[in-house]
Image: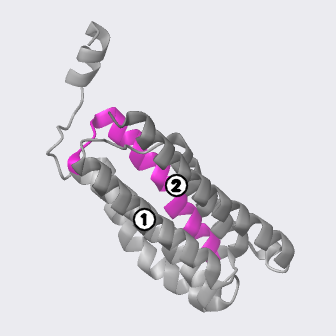
Amino acid sequence: MSPEVERSELLKRFGPGAIRTPANLITIGRLVLAVPTLFLIVELGSGWVTVALWFVLSVTDGLDGWLARRDGTTRAGAFLDPLADKFLAVGGFTALAIRGDTSWIPVVIIAGREVVVSLYRAYEGRRGVSLPARQLGKWKTFIQMCAIGFVLLPFTADAVALQRAVIWTAVALTVVSALDIVVAARRRTP
């Protein structure tokens, strides 16, 4: 390790075992705020209140990641942050499907991808192959959050064809990001 990297690691405020960190508190807040937000999506659908709450939940994902990189990543954060992302993405698409704003097919594909990728990571982990989050997966989450937000925007509420295009773009990226993980595992397999 270079002296600069060692010095920056020493300046981290929290070690891997820390639980009460600003990043983890934001992630827990995201999980707690997600529940009423998802209920509001089901009850109200498109509207400025739901868009505002969804925006806060989406933007704080980047904030907790930035804080974790600045202060030190933790095992709790490594578990909670992806859990919050999955809960929001699957929950958001489920809420839209319950309302009839989208079909259940995107929900099944997105939820199925998350289950399959989690099982695949566990399988490869037992074989000694580590599969950390990839950039395409981060983009997938961002696009999924944007797609849900797009459907919730009041001025796109009647643009059903455009909403479907945005949703299916998110679904396509969801599938591509799963394939990206498989390809990465094949490259790392001894």
Question: Is the C-beta separation of discs 1 and 2 under 8 Å?
Answer: yes
When the figure is inspected, residue 76 is found, relative to residue 73, above or below; the finding is below
Left or right of 19 on screen, residue 133: right
Q: Secondary structure at mark 2?
A: helix
Q: Nearer the viewer, residue 133 or 187?
A: 187
Work out which quarter of the rendered image holds the N terminus and state it: top left
Residue 76 falls inside the magenta stretch: no
Q: Quadrant of the C terminus?
A: top left
List x then y, in percent, for residue 25.
Answer: 29, 57
Instruction: Name the residue tied to disc 1.
Output: 116
Is residue 138 visible to the viewer in this orientation of the structure? no
Q: Which residue is mark 2?
A: 178
* Amino acid identity at mark 1: Val
Q: Secondary structure at mark 1?
A: helix
Where is residue 7 shown, x and y percent of the image?
A: 24, 15
Residue 108, visible in the rendered structure:
yes
Bounds of the magenta span? 49-75
Q: Residue at x 29, y 56 (%)?
A: 122
Judged from this view, the residue extending furthest toward the left is 17
